[in-house]
Image (spheres, coloured by chain):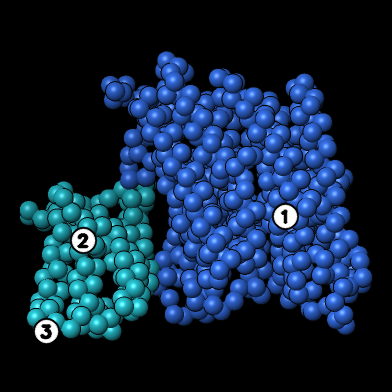
C-alpha cells in the first residue's frame, strides 16, 4: 500500500495498539480482556505495520521468528502453572501477591503465555500471506 | 523427590511433551537442537509413563486435580490400570517410532515443524488417556486433531493435502458430534466430571436426551476409531504421510477413539441399556468384515495395512459388545498387542520401501534372498497380526473369541474366526509379493536398510515375542483392568471427595 498518510501514521498506530494490548492483557484477570484478546490486538498492530511499510519492517520490529514467539508463549504458560505444583500440590493452582491495590499473580504469567502464542500464531499466518500480496 | 514424582505421576506424561514442544518451537531454526530436545523429551516421556504404570500397579487408581479445584468442579486426571497401560504403551511406541525416524525424517519435514507437532500430538494422546473430565477429553481430541492435521500436511504435496482435507473434514465432524453429545449430557445431569456422571446418571430419569447423547458419543468416537460404516477416511489418508507419521497414527490415534468408547460405555453409559449392545455388535461385525475385504483388493503395502487397522478395531469393539469381564480383558489385551504390532508393520512397510524402492507389491520382490534379516523381522508382526500361535495376536484373538463363544454369540465368534483367516491371506500376500517371488525390476542388490530402522523394528518385534511366549502377566493385568472397568466404585472413590457438596446440583 503506497499511501503516505498511512505509512506516516502506521508507527503511531502500532505503538498505540501495542500499548492497548498490554493494558488489555493486564486487566484481563478480573475484567474483560486477557491474553487472547491482547494477543489479537498486538497482532493487528504488527499487521498494520506490515501493510503500511512492508513485511520486512514488521519482521524486523518483532525481532524473533513468529514460531519462536509461540514457543516462548507455551513455556511461559507452563511456567505459570508450576508454582502451584509446589505450593498447593496442584498444577495451575495460581498464586497471588497483593501489593497495595495491585494484584499480581501467576495467572499473569499464564496470560502472557497465551498472549505470545496468539501473537505468534496469527503473525506466522498473516505475514506469510502479506508476502504474497 | 521420588515421592513428589510419584504423587504427580499422571501429570508428567502430558506436561513433558508440551514442554518439549514449546522448547522445540523456541529453537525453530536450529534443527539439530530440536532433534536433541525431542530425543531427550521422548526418553523422559518413556521413563515417566513407566513410572506411572508402576505407581498405578502398586497404589491403585491415582487422581490429581488442576488449579486447586476439587473433583466435580475442577478438571482431574485419573490413571487407572487401563489408562496407565495405554500411556505406557504410548511411551514405548513413541520411543521406537522416533528411533525409526532418525533415519526416515527428511530435512524438509524438520523445517516444517515435525518435532513440535509430534510432541504436541503425544501430549494430546496422553491427555485423552488420562483425563477424568468429559469436556477435557474433547479438548485433548482437538489438540490431537490439529497436530495430526499438521503432521499429515507437512510434506506439502498434492496427495498429502488431499488426504489432510479428507481427514480434517470427517474428524471435525466427529468432534462436533462428540461436543453435541457432551452438551446434551451436561443439560441432563449438570456435571462433566466422568466419575460424577457415573454417580449421578443412575439417579437421573431416562430421557430421549440421554439416549441421543449416548448415540452421538458412540458415533463421534466411532468415526475417530474407524468403525464401519464410517471408516473410509482412514485408508484414504493414512498411507500418504511419511512412514514415521503413519506408524504413530496407525498405532495410536484410532485407539484413542476405542479407549474413549471403552471409558464412556463402561463408566458413564452401559452397553446393556437402550439397545446399544446390538448396535455395537453390528458395528463390530461390519468393521471386521469390511476392513479385511478392503485390504484384500489392495496392492500398496500401506493401504493394505490401513484397511487392517479397521478390521482389527472390530475385534476390540467385539469385546465391548460382549462386555463380560473376560471379553473386556480380551479387548484390552487386543488393544495393547495391536498398537505394537500395527505400528511395527508400518515401520516394516517403510523398510521394504527403503530396500526395494517401492510401496507397490507388484513391483517389488526377492527381499527374502537379498535381506533375510528383514524377512525374519517381517514374519513376527505379520503372523502375530494374523493370529498364529504362539505370537501375541493368537492370545489376543483367542481371548476375545473365547469370551464371545462363552457369551453365546456364536455368529459373531464365527465371523471373527473367518476374518482371522482372511487376515492371514493378506499377510501372506505381502510375504509372497515382497519377499518370496522373483524380483520384478532387474536391480542387482536390495538397498541397505539403515540401522535405526532395524533397531526400532527389532525391538517392537521382541516385545511381540515376549508377550507371545509369556502372555500370563499381561492377561492378568488385562483382567484387573477389565474388572476395574466393570466395577467403577474404586474409580469413584479415588476421584470424588468423601462428602460431596449436594447443594451445588442444579
- Check the image and report above or below for B185 versus B365: above
Q: Are marks 1 and 3 in contact (CB under 8 Å)?
A: no
Circle 3 — which element?
Answer: helix
Q: Alpha-carbon neighbours of circle 2 within 10 Å: few (<14), some, or many (≥20)?
A: many
Q: Are marks 1 and 2 in contact (CB under 8 Å)?
A: no
The quarter holding residue B18 reads: bottom left
Residue B138's disc number: none
Circle 2 — which element?
Answer: helix
Residue A38's disc number: 2
Q: Are marks 2 and 3 in contact (CB under 8 Å)?
A: no
Left or right of residue B405: residue B132? left
Name the foreground residue: B12 vs B54: B12
Q: Which residue is mark 1?
A: B305
Q: Colour of chain A?
A: cyan
Q: CA distance from mark 2 to mark 3?
A: 28 Å
- Check the image and report above or below for A53 versus B308: below
Residue A4's disc number: 3
- Check the image and report above or below for B436 versus B311: below
Is residue B492 visible from the viewing direction of this image? no
Q: Which chain is blue?
A: B
Residue drawn at x 13%, y 64% is: A20
The earlier-in-sequence mark between 2 and 3 is 3
Circle 1 — which element?
Answer: helix
Q: CA distance from mark 1 to mark 3?
A: 61 Å
**In the rendering, at what x and y percent does residue B232 appear?**
62, 48
- Mark 2 vs mark 3, foreground winner is 3
Which chain letter matches label 3? A
Left or right of residue A45: residue B422? right
Q: CA distance from mark 1 to mark 2?
A: 47 Å
Amino acid at each position: 500500500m503506497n499511501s503516505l498518510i498511512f505509512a506516516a501514521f502506521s508507527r503511531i498506530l502500532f505503538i498505540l495498539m501495542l500499548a492497548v494490548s498490554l493494558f488489555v492483557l493486564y486487566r484481563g484477570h478480573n475484567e474483560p480482556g486477557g491474553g487472547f484478546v491482547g494477543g489479537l490486538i498486538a497482532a493487528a498492530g504488527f499487521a498494520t505495520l506490515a501493510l503500511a511499510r512492508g513485511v520486512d519492517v514488521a519482521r524486523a520490529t518483532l525481532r524473533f521468528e513468529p514460531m519462536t514467539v509461540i514457543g516462548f508463549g507455551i513455556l511461559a504458560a507452563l511456567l505459570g502453572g508450576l508454582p502451584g505444583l509446589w505450593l498447593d500440590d496442584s498444577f495451575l493452582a495460581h498464586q497471588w501477591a497483593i501489593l497495595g491495590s495491585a494484584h499480581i499473580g501467576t495467572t499473569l504469567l499464564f496470560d502472557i503465555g497465551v498472549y505470545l502464542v496468539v501473537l505468534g500464531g496469527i503473525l506466522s499466518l498473516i505475514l506469510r500471506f502479506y508476502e504474497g500480496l | 523427590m521420588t515421592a513428589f514424582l510419584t504423587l504427580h505421576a499422571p501429570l508428567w506424561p502430558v506436561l513433558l511433551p508440551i514442554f518439549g514442544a514449546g522448547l522445540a518451537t523456541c529453537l525453530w531454526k536450529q534443527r539439530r537442537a530440536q532433534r536433541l530436545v525431542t530425543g531427550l523429551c521422548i526418553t523422559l516421556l518413556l521413563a515417566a509413563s513407566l513410572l506411572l504404570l508402576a505407581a498405578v500397579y502398586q497404589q491403585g487408581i491415582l487422581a490429581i486435580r488442576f488449579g486447586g479445584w476439587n473433583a466435580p468442579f475442577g478438571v482431574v486426571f485419573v490413571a487407572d490400570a487401563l489408562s496407565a497401560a495405554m500411556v505406557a504403551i504410548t511411551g514405548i511406541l513413541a520411543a521406537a517410532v522416533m528411533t525409526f525416524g532418525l533415519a526416515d525424517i527428511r530435512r524438509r519435514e524438520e523445517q516444517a515443524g515435525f518435532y513440535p507437532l509430534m510432541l504436541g500430538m503425544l501430549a494430546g494422546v496422553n491427555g485423552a488417556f488420562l483425563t477424568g473430565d468429559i469436556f477435557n477429553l474433547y479438548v485433548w481430541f482437538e489438540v490431537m486433531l490439529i497436530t495430526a492435521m499438521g503432521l499429515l500436511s507437512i510434506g506439502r504435496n498434492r496427495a498429502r493435502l488431499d488426504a489432510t482435507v479428507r481427514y480434517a473434514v470427517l474428524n471435525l465432524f466427529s468432534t462436533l458430534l462428540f461436543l453435541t453429545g457432551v452438551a446434551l449430557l451436561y443439560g441432563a445431569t449438570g456435571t462433566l466430571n466422568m466419575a460424577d456422571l457415573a454417580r449421578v446418571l443412575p439417579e437421573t430419569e431416562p430421557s430421549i436426551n440421554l439416549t441421543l447423547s449416548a448415540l452421538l458419543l458412540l458415533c463421534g468416537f466411532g468415526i475417530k476409531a474407524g468403525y464401519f460404516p464410517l471408516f473410509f477416511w482412514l485408508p484414504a489418508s493414512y498411507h500418504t504421510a511419511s512412514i514415521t507419521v503413519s506408524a504413530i497414527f496407525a498405532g495410536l490415534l484410532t485407539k484413542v477413539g476405542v479407549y474413549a468408547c471403552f471409558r464412556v460405555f463402561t463408566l458413564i453409559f452401559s452397553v446393556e441399556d437402550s439397545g446399544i449392545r446390538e448396535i455395537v455388535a453390528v458395528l463390530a461385525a461390519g468393521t471386521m468384515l469390511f476392513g479385511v475385504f478392503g485390504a484384500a483388493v489392495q496392492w500398496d503395502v500401506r493401504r493394505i495395512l490401513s484397511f487392517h487397522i479397521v478390521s482389527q478395531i472390530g475385534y476390540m469393539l467385539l469385546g465391548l459388545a460382549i462386555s463380560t469381564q473376560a471379553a473386556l480383558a480380551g479387548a484390552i489385551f487386543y488393544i495393547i498387542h495391536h498398537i505394537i504390532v500395527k505400528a511395527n508393520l508400518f515401520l516394516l512397510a517403510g523398510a521394504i520401501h527403503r530396500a526395494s524402492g517401492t510401496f507397490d507389491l507388484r513391483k517389488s520382490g526377492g527381499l527374502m534372498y537379498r535381506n533375510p534379516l528383514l524377512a525374519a523381522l517381517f514374519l513376527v508382526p505379520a503372523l502375530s497380526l494374523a493370529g498364529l500361535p504362539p505370537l501375541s495376536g493368537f492370545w489376543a484373538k483367542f481371548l476375545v473369541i473365547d469370551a464371545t463363544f462363552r457369551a453365546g454369540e456364536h455368529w459373531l465368534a464365527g465371523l471373527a474366526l473367518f476374518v482371522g483367516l482372511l487376515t492371514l491371506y493378506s499377510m501372506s500376500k505381502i510375504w509372497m509379493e515382497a519377499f518370496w517371488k522373483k524380483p520384478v525390476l532387474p536391480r542387482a542388490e536390495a538397498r541397505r536398510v539403515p540401522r535405526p530402522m532395524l533397531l526400532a523394528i527389532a525391538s517392537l518385534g521382541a516385545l511381540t515375542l515376549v508377550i507371545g511366549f509369556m502372555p500370563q502377566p499381561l492377561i492378568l493385568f488385562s483382567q484387573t483392568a477389565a474388572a476395574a472397568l466393570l466395577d467403577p466404585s474404586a474409580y469413584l472413590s479415588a476421584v470424588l471427595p468423601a462428602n460431596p457438596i449436594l447443594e451445588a446440583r442444579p
